[in-house]
Image (cartoon, helix red, strand yellow):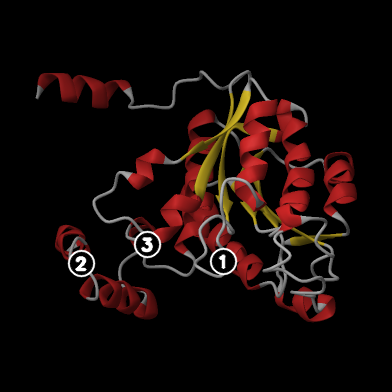
């Protein structure tokens, strides 16, 4: 059945899209199968959590953290909770979810790099009590990212971070969030899967390399020699590319003490491949 589904999934739109909808809607197959063919709610979020947990398991970690920076109404955070619940069972690993937000909506754009022609202060204000009632285990970290990013590690002492969803919209806010990546290595897996929500857009947004999240990424890489945000070329090379593939980066901590730990094929797999 899995092979048949895989063949069908290679078909072009609209058949492929319809099939994914049906599989997601009726939860056909196992959760892991649905994740692998992206037939789940917010497959980009599932991808981040699944691969972060898989890496942590390979490295022997017992618990990891996943962060969403920019929560707004909270639908993404609720989705993260559900994925974490399922993936935690698959890998027998604990997964903590943290959602960062001011609670007051977007601040006023600082300059052209925050795209004031597209964003306005006050967008996406959160109904905190309503969202709190929807959450099961995720922790809301409320306040200006400039402050909460500094306090987070000492206040929460989180398990190593394996995935981060960046959805702060602004260049200036993303720059502040990136300061968290300078924390001690114990707070991170050696490679952290990242999703950037505002790097594609359309004719209205006109995101580019000189404003917004893309500029923040470029400047971060220029300022850091041993920590780099790298494009997920492994996704972009797939025969059928989903738009969100171009929104995935991986943060590589080259000087992390676990960076060079082997996580590839086990010895049995290697011997099997050599003999075939």
Residue for badge 2: 12
The answer to whether any part of residue 63 appears in the image is: no
At a point 83% along the width and 40% down the height, the residue shown is 153
Mark 1 and mark 3 lie on one chain; the one further toward the N terminus is 3
73 to 58, vertically: above or below = below
Q: Report how far apart the C-alphas of labels 2 and 1 lie in the structure.
A: 29 Å
Q: Quadrant of the C terminus?
A: top left
At a point 71% along the width and 75% down the height, the residue shown is 73
Using residue 73 as the reference point, say whether residue 5 is left or right of it: left
| Residue 92, percent from left and from top | 53, 47
Q: Quadrant of the N terminus?
A: bottom left
Using residue 219 as the reference point, say whether residue 53 is left or right of it: left
User: 167 or 119: nearer the eye?
Assistant: 119
| Residue 224, percent from left and from top | 68, 25
Q: Residues within 10 Å of mark 1 (few under 14, many from 20)?
A: some
| Residue 191, percent from left and from top | 56, 33
The circle drawn on residue 234 is none
Mark 3 and mark 2 lie on one chain; the one further toward the N terminus is 2
Q: Secondary structure at mark 3?
A: loop
């Amino acid at each position: 059945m899995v092979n048949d589904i895989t063949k069908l999934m290679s078909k072009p739109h609209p058949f492929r899209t319809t099939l994914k909808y049906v599989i997601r809607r009726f939860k056909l197959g196992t959760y892991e199968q649905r994740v692998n063919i992206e037939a789940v709610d917010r497959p980009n979020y599932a991808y981040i959590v699944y691969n972060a947990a898989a890496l942590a398991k390979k490295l022997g970690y017992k618990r990891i953290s996943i962060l969403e920076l920019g929560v707004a109404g909270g639908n993404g955070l609720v989705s993260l909770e559900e994925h974490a619940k399922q993936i935690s069972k698959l890998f027998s690993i604990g997964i903590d979810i943290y959602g960062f937000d001011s609670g007051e909506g977007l601040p006023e754009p600082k300059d052209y790099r925050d795209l004031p022609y597209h964003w306005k202060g006050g967008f996406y204000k959160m109904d905190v009590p309503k969202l709190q009632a929807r959450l099961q285990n995720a922790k809301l970290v409320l306040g200006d990212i400039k402050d909460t990013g500094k306090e987070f590690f000492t206040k929460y002492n989180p398990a190593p971070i394996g995935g981060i969803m960046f959805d702060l919209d602004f260049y200036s806010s993303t720059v502040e969030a990136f300061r968290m990546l300078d924390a001690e290595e114990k707070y991170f897996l050696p490679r952290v899967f990242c999703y950037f929500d505002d790097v594609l857009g359309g004719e209205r947004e006109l995101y580019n390399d000189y404003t917004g999240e893309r500029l923040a990424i470029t400047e971060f890489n220029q300022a850091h020699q041993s920590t780099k945000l790298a494009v997920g070329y492994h996704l972009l090379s797939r025969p059928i590319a989903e738009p969100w593939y171009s929104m995935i980066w991986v943060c590589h901590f080259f000087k992390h003490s676990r960076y060079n730990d082997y996580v590839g094929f086990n010895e049995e797999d290697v011997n099997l491949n050599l003999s075939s």
